[in-house]
Image: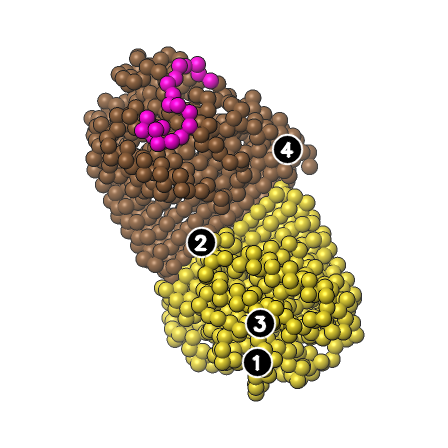
């Protein structure tokens, strides 16, 4: 069929020149010696002036990491990672004292963010989003601090939180993702450099969306940020996360950990737009995005909602999960994953139902084009105590071109007769009927494909906060540019 | 090899002593593949939950019981009747195995058209060894990597062969009965079955695995099936083993152009059972229908693992599995559909639904779609839950007693799967088996049974 052939060609045309975030910022940075050993861990900890207990925790993680092997069950292939060939700490020079205000920040850096579309200065007045920007390993600026402090919200780099509220960090760090969890998470526990810390006090509805922008800039660095969000009783927060990296030939490792904790009646909404450099059209370079994200609904009636738009990275290995401990707690997972060229993605979620009347909903939309391979892998587990629990899962895959693959591997484990699990999955191509219908209404083939793909993703796009929805829609366009007009 | 597999390795250690008693001992090619099989099994060991395909099934009975290979004497156990699945076995062709040994005295040759050969494997090895050589181990492709298949290849001691020549159609179902449980010590046996249908042939085979005594036994079955162009095989199986039985079955099927393979497995008994079916749709227009029902209670464990590989354009598959779990029983369903690049125009549907009747029961489902072609329509669905309370209320409000209402709902739930059996006689026989399994069947009057 004409439209399909065209689509395939156009998708293949999609080369690295479409990755508009592939610039390098020329800033002097201070790095730890290359390689990974206990000294690296000590170096990072010393750089951050960390308390003794945290250094001990890092070292425990590091020693455990040495005994672990790479998780092999996912449907991705890559050469073994040489952990000694990376830098584990890279900080823009001159941030030792920490920026006092935006004026003190290196103008080069600010320009970088402008290119990314988050001009820090402007947004303070215009967009009303508080941003914690993580550049390589260190948080460079956090806006809107004053306004947030008024209502008691703590939103700061995790290194700062260790000084401000060490008890909170100590109480919750590693309680959702233990340092023994998996090889990537354990590595993160040993060498995490920065990340955001959020605490919403009881009864507070966070007055604005909180946001972090991650960017890997320096060469041969890995990025290991750690995010910890605690929503105390009856509070609400919406958190946005975005990521980009410059174009480089070698693969860079990004192994982040995100821990969410929702207490009684609290709600956390966590949205991600992931657009790490995906490598060129032959699969050279690109980020290995091995991320462990998990939320614990500890309290009654608590809710955690994950929304992700995954368009970047050479390899994505990511399963944002919910542990539904509290009675009546709710977990949600909305995902769009787009893979093109040689990208590989193995992503999905885990919903672990422990409490009574817990409910979860999974909506996953995968689009695979070029020579990419994509897998939805998810687990829904109903424990014997999960009386009246419910899950609904819908995963749909769309294939564009005959060189790509789309796979669906859901796991369902139910040990409670009153629990109801419903799972549906479909895989298809863009139907000729739909295209024909649109074209005979005078809509050009490309625009027709765009309409169909947009419609395919709509359920998930609708879940994104306004600020992100615009960017996400743009990204969907960039990732499939040519095929969607 | 770890201690956990030492029990069954007793076979491997005794292999040299066992071998002379196995059928076809004088055939050198058979000797070779048996030896290769035992070697591969020694290398691989028994599957453990560490393997992704065995994530939910642990072969515990093989760890805690020591099994002896079956002897001729075990095969002579006295039975007073053959539990035929189909009514009035009169002149119906039927083969019978007792404790894994053939019992020619119960063999009904029946009235078969020319070109249909239903025989014991032992006889085939004796009379037409060249045919056996050309077919044994040729149909399952790379399945030699599976340790249970390798073990069967090494130890195969019984089984049947069905050959249907091109163009020959057999209307009546052919029944093969495997009776187990009549020994006073734990035994193991290894049937190897071959079914080969020529171009345009048609046949219906009903395999009835049934436990009559209380003995513990381990049946490791391998069935190889080759369906020629435009041919059709209806392959039905009832697995009603004893509460101490371990039943592991592997079936490999090749389906040629425009041919059809219809499979239905009814699991209603066995301490541990696994039915693994792997189908290759190799020719354009080939179709597979894989269906089943599993009804478990007590602490039974059953595992249905299926794989359908679409290798040619315009191939189709349809899969419906339904299960009912009571007490502390556990069931596993793993269904994988692979669509290769060449298989444009594939249409595949899979559905797995399970009812949990008791709080202690557990279901683990893993449907899988692996798709490399773009012009496809594939879907799967899976649900688990309990009997719908509103439906129950509706029936009770119409004066139907609760126990009967529950049975009706379970029966109608399973009906969707049973309806896939195209042979009416077999469908009725299987439905009857299901009704007998249901609790408090005494509430069902004759007229309800015919519903």
Residue in front for this viewpoint, A194 or A411: A194
Q: Position of residue A53 (x, y in %)?
A: 24, 35
Q: Which residue is mark 2?
A: A412
Q: Is residue A317 visible?
A: yes
Chain A's shade in the image? brown
Q: Chain of mark 3?
A: B
Q: Disc 3 versus disc 1: distance between alpha carbons? A: 11 Å
Circle 4 or circle 1, nearest the eye? 1
Q: Chain of mark 2?
A: A
Q: Which residue is mark 3?
A: B189
Query: Compared with residue B350, is residue A196 higher up or lower down, i.e. above or below?
Result: above
Q: Which residue is mark 1?
A: B74
Neighbour class for label 2 at 10 Å: few (<14), some, many (≥20)? many
Q: Is residue A397 visible?
A: no
Q: Chain of mark 4?
A: A
Q: Which residue is mark 4?
A: A8
Residue at 45%, 78% (x, y): give it. Answer: B441
**Residues in magenta?**
A24-43
Circle 3 or circle 2, nearest the eye? 3
Q: Disc 4 versus disc 3: distance between alpha carbons? A: 54 Å
* Residue A37 is inside the magenta segment: yes
Neighbour class for label 4 at 10 Å: few (<14), some, many (≥20)? some
Q: Secondary structure at mark 4?
A: helix
Residue at 74%, 77% (x, y): give it. Answer: B112
Q: Disc 3 versus disc 2: distance between alpha carbons? A: 33 Å
Q: Disc 2 versus disc 1: distance between alpha carbons? A: 42 Å
* Chain rendered yellow: B
Circle 2 or circle 1, nearest the eye? 1
């Amino acid at each position: 069929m004409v439209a399909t052939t065209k689509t395939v060609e156009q998708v293949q045309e999609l080369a690295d020149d479409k990755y508009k975030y592939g610039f390098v910022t020329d800033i002097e940075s201070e790095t730890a010696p290359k390689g990974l050993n206990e000294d690296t861990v000590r170096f990072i900890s010393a750089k951050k002036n960390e308390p003794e207990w945290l250094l001990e925790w890092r070292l425990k993680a590091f020693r455990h990491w040495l005994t672990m092997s790479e998780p092999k069950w996912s449907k991705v292939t890559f050469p073994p990672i040489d952990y000694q060939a990376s830098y584990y700490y890279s900080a823009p020079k001159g941030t030792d004292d920490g920026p006092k205000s935006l004026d003190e920040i290196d103008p080069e850096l600010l320009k970088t963010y402008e290119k990314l579309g988050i001009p820090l200065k402007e947004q303070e007045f215009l967009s009303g989003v508080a941003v914690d920007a993580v550049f390589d390993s260190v948080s460079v600026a956090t806006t809107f601090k004053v306004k947030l402090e008024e209502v008691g919200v703590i939103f700061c780099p995790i290194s700062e939180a260790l000084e401000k509220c060490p008890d909170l960090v100590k109480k919750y760090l590693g309680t959702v993702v233990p340092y023994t969890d998996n090889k990537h998470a354990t590595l993160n526990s040993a060498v995490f450099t920065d990340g955001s810390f959020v605490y919403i006090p009881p009864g507070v509805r966070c007055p604005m969306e909180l946001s972090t922008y991650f960017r890997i800039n320096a060469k041969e660095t890995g990025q290991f940020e750690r995010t910890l969000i605690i929503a105390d009783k009856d509070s609400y927060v919406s958190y946005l996360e975005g990521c980009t990296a410059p174009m480089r030939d070698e693969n860079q490792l990004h192994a982040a950990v995100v821990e969410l904790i929702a207490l009684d009646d609290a709600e956390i909404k966590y949205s991600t737009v992931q657009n790490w450099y995906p490598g060129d059209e032959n699969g050279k370079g690109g980020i290995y995005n091995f991320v462990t994200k998990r939320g614990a609904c500890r309290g009654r009636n608590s809710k955690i909602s994950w929304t992700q738009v995954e368009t970047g990275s050479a390899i994505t290995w990511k399963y944002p999960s919910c542990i539904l401990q509290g009675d009546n707690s709710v977990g949600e997972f909305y995902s769009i994953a787009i893979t093109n060229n040689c990208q590989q993605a193995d992503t999905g979620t885990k919903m672990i139902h422990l409490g009574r009347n817990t409910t979860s909903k999974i909506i996953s939309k995968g689009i695979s084009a070029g020579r990419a391979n994509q897998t939805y892998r998810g687990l829904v587990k109903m424990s014997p105590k999960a009386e009246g629990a419910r899950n609904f899962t819908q995963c749909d895959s769309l294939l564009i071109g005959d060189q790509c693959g789309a796979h669906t591997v859901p796991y369902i484990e139910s040990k409670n007769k009153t629990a109801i699990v419903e799972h549906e999955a479909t895989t298809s191509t863009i139907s000729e009927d739909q295209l024909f219908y649109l074209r005979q209404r005078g809509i050009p083939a490309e625009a027709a494909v765009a309409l169909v793909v947009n419609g395919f993703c709509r359920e998930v796009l609708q879940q994104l906060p306004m600020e992100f929805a615009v960017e996400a829609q743009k990204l969907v366009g960039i990732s499939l540019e040519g095929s969607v007009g | 090899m770890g201690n956990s597999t030492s029990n069954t390795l007793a076979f491997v250690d005794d292999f040299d002593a066992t071998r002379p008693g196995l059928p076809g001992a004088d055939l050198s090619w058979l000797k070779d593949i048996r030896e290769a099989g035992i070697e591969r099994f020694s290398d691989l060991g028994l599957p453990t939950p560490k393997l992704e395909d065995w994530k939910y099934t642990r072969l515990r009975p093989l760890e805690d019981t020591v099994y002896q290979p079956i002897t001729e004497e075990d095969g002579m156990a006295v039975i007073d009747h053959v539990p035929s699945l189909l009514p009035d076995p009169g002149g119906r062709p039927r083969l019978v195995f007792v404790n894994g040994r053939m019992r020619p005295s119960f063999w009904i040759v029946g009235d078969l058209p020319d070109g249909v050969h239903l025989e014991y494997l032992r006889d085939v090895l004796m009379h037409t060894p060249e045919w056996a050589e050309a077919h044994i181990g040729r149909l399952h492709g790379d399945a030699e990597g599976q340790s249970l298949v390798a073990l069967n290849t090494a130890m195969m001691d019984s089984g049947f062969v069905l050959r249907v020549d091109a163009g020959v159609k057999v209307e009546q179902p052919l029944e093969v009965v495997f009776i187990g449980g009549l020994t006073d010590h734990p035994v193991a046996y290894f049937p190897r079955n071959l079914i080969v249908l020529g171009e345009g042939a048609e046949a219906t085979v009903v395999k009835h695995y049934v436990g009559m005594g209380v003995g513990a036994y381990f049946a490791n079955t391998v069935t190889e099936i080759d369906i020629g162009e435009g041919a059709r095989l209806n392959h039905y199986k009832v697995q009603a083993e004893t509460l101490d039985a371990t039943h592991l079955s592997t079936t490999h099927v090749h389906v040629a152009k425009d041919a059809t393979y219809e499979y239905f497995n009814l699991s209603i008994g066995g301490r541990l059972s696994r039915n693994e079916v792997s189908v290759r749709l190799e020719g354009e227009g080939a179709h597979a229908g894989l269906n089943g029902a599993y009804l478990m209670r007590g602490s039974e464990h059953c595992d249905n693992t299926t794989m359908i590989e679409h290798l040619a354009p315009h191939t189709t598959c349809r899969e419906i599995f339904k299960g009912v779990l009571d007490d502390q029983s556990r069931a596993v369903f793993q269904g994988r559909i692979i669509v290769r690049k060449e298989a444009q125009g594939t249409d595949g549907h899979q559905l797995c639904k399970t009812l949990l009747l008791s709080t202690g029961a557990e279901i683990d489902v893993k449907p899988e779609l692996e798709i490399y072609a773009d012009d496809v329509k594939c879907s799967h669905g899976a649900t688990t839950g309990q009997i719908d309370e509103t439906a129950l209320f509706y029936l009770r409000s119409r004066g139907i007693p609760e126990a009967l209402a529950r049975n009706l709902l379970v029966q109608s739930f399973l009906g969707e799967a049973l309806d896939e059996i195209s042979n009416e006689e077999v469908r009725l026989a299987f439905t009857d088996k299901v009704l007998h399994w249901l609790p408090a069947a005494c509430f069902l009057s004759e007229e309800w049974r015919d519903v």
